[in-house]
Amino acid sequence: MKPSASSVRLRLTLWYTSVLALIVLAFSLAVFLFVKDRLFRQFDRGITKEFAAVAIEVAEDAGDFGDIESPSMFEVFRGGVSIFRSASFRKAGLPESPGVPTAGIRTVRSGGGERFRLQAGPVKSDRFLVVAQDEEPVWNALHTLLAILYLALPIALLLAALGGYVLAGRLLAPVGAMARQAEKIGAESLSERLPVKNPDDEFGKLAAVFNQTLSRLQSAFERLQRFTADASHELRTPLAALRSVGEVALQEDLDVTAYRDRIGSMLEETSRLTNLVESLLVLTRADSGRLPMNRKPADIGALVGKAVEDLRVLAEERNQNLTADLPAGVLVSTDEGLLRQAVVNILDNAIKYTPPGGTIRVAMRGQPGVAGIEVVDSGPGIPADQRDKIFDRFYRVEKDRPRDAGGVGLGLAIAKWAVEANGGAIEVESREGQGSTFRIVLPK
C-alpha cells in the first residue's frame, strides 16, 4: 500500500532521517575539526624540528650562509634587514617582509595563492631566522576527507531512510492488523477481538485495552438487547389484556354493572402499563445522563418517614405490621425526589413479598460519616444464588409469581440507580425463610 504524506510510517521515517542527518552532520564536523587539529599539530611539530636544525647551521655560519646545505626554505635577518633567502624560499614566491617578522608560527600565502606555514625566532643576538613549509599537503588531505564525508553523508542517509522505512513498517504492522480487524467488527460481531501479538509492548497493551472496551460494549449491547426484549414482553402483556377485555366486552351483550367491571379491568391494566412506561423512562433517562440532579441538604429521617406513611395503607391492607424508628436531625446531601423513589421502591418490594400478618421495620443506623437506612422484612428471603441478580432489570426471584404481586422487576433496579446517583450504596442481606434486609448507605 502506497503511504500518504500523513501516514505515521512516512512521518516516522522522515523524523528518524532528519534526526540522523543532524547527528551525522555534527559527527562529521567534529571529525573534520579533530583531524584538522591533529594534522596541524603534527605539521607544527615538524616545522619546529626543522627550525631547530636550520638554526644550528645559521648560528655556526660565518656570515654568507651560501654554504648551508639544507633543502629547507628559510630567510635570515640581521639588524632588521633580510640578508639571505634560500633558493627554495625565493622559488616559492613568498612575499618579502618589510621588517623583522614577529616570533612564532603563522600561515601566509605566496604570490600564487599557496599557503605556507612560517616559524620565526632569534638565533643569535644579531640574527633572526624564518623557516617556511608548504601547507598544501595538509589541506589536500583535509579536502580529501571532506569529499569522503560529502559523498558518504547522502548515501548513509539514503540507506538509513530505507532501513527506517522498513523498520517503521514492521513496527507498525500490528497497528495495521488491528485496523483491518476493527473494520470487520460491527453490531453483529462484537465478539470478535483485535489480535495481540506481544502483550508486553505498547501496541499489545493498546490492543488489550481495545479488547476490554469491546468486551464492555458487547456486554452493554447484550444488556440492551435483553432490556429491549424484556420491555417488549412486559409491554405486550398489559396491551394484550386491554385488547382481550375490550374485544370480549364488544362481543357480549352486558349490563351496566358488567361493563363497569370490564372498564375497571382495563383501567387496572392501563395503570400497570403507565407505571411500567414511567419506570422505563426513568431508566432510559438515567442511562443517557439526562435526568437532572438537585442535591441539597435534607433531613433523611423526615424524608424516609413520609415515604413510610405514604405506603402504610398498603401494609394495613395486607394486615402487616409496619414500624419506623427514624430519629430527626440527620442531614445528607441528596436529591430528595430520587432518594424517596428508592426508599418507596424498596419498601413497596418488602410489602409485596412479605406474607399477610408479617412485619416490616424501617430504621436508621448511624455510623461515622455515613447514614444508613434499613428496611427489614419477614418475607420468604432471597436464595443465595439470586442475590446478585435482584437489581437487574426485569429480574424477579419467583418467575411464576403473579405480576400484581411481584411487579415487573424494575423497582430495585431504579432504587439502586437512585441511591448510587446520590453518592451512596445499596446492600442486601437475606436468608431463605428468615426475611431480608435492604440497607441504603449515604454520606452525611
Image (cartoon, helix red, strand yellow):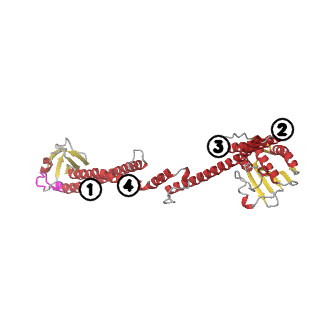
* Residue 436 placement (x, y as % from top left): 80, 56
Discs 3/1, front: 3
Kind of residue at disc 1: Gln
Which residue in the structure is indicated by mark 3? 288
Discs 4/2, front: 2
* Residue 418 placement (x, y as % from top left): 72, 46
Q: Nearer the viewer, residue 105 or 163?
A: 163
Kind of residue at disc 3: Ser
Magenta part, dominant SS: loop
Residue range in magenta is 56-68
Kind of residue at disc 2: Val
Which residue in the structure is indicated by mark 4? 166
N-terminal of the pair, mark 4 or mark 1, is 1
Indicate the secondary structure of the residue bearing disc 1. Answer: helix
Disc 3/disc 1 C-alpha distance (Å): 82 Å
Q: Is residue 374 visible?
A: no
Indicate the secondary structure of the residue bearing disc 2. Answer: helix
Residue 42, which numbered label? 1
